[in-house]
Amino acid sequence: QPLEGRWNIKTTMLTKFESKSARVKGLAFHPVRPWICASLHNGVIQLWDYRVGTVIDRFEEHDGPVRGVDFHLHEPLIVTGGDDYKIKVWDYKLRRCLFTLLGHLDYIRTVQFHPNATQFPWILSASDDQTLRLWDFQKR
């Protein structure tokens, strides 16, 4: 049976954000705070407060589109991956990039912290170089 036949759900759009600068390539919810992180085609990472619909911070160090973004569950960290073949880990409290992980040979499509990153301080990345890479960001 088709999905629409089994579900009778009415949805409502809660709010709409416009980046006004570039196409959005990646999104992540903060696990606790009312924030959304958006990675953009122009290389900028925007931190949004979805309660008020405004950009509260932005990070710029990637050269080219940023396609992957994720929040750490417990630490004030964001991980991003882009077309510059770089993975960057940002501290949003310090408002800066802490370090860059190098190794991919093509565009990075997605990045994620391990869901239990306190026990497993790992970042998973996938790239057009046809590799998945698992990084221990405490032993860089």
Image: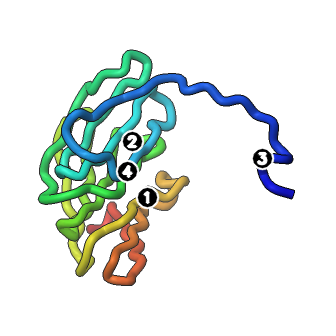
Give the distance between the C-alpha atoms of the residues marked 3 and 2, in whole angstroms.
40 Å
User: Which element type, helix, strand or loop, lies under badge 2?
Assistant: loop
User: Which element type, helix, strand or loop, lies under badge 3?
Assistant: helix
The residue carrying mark 2 is 75
The residue positioned 41% from the left and 30% from the top of the image is 35
- Which amino acid, by three-letter code, is at mark 2? Glu
- Which amino acid, by three-letter code, is at mark 1? Gln
Residue 44: x, y in percent?
19, 45
Q: Is residue 112 above or below residue 29?
A: below
From the image, which quarter does the C terminus lie in? Answer: bottom left
The residue carrying mark 3 is 4
Give the distance between the C-alpha atoms of the residues marked 4 and 3, in whole angstroms.
27 Å
- Which amino acid, by three-letter code, is at mark 3? Glu
Task: State if disc 3 and disc 4 touch (CB < 8 Å).
Answer: no
Q: Crowding near pointer 3: few (<14 within 10 Å), some, many (20+)?
A: few
The residue carrying mark 4 is 26
Foreground: disc 1 or disc 3: 3
Q: Nearer the viewer, residue 128 or 116?
A: 128
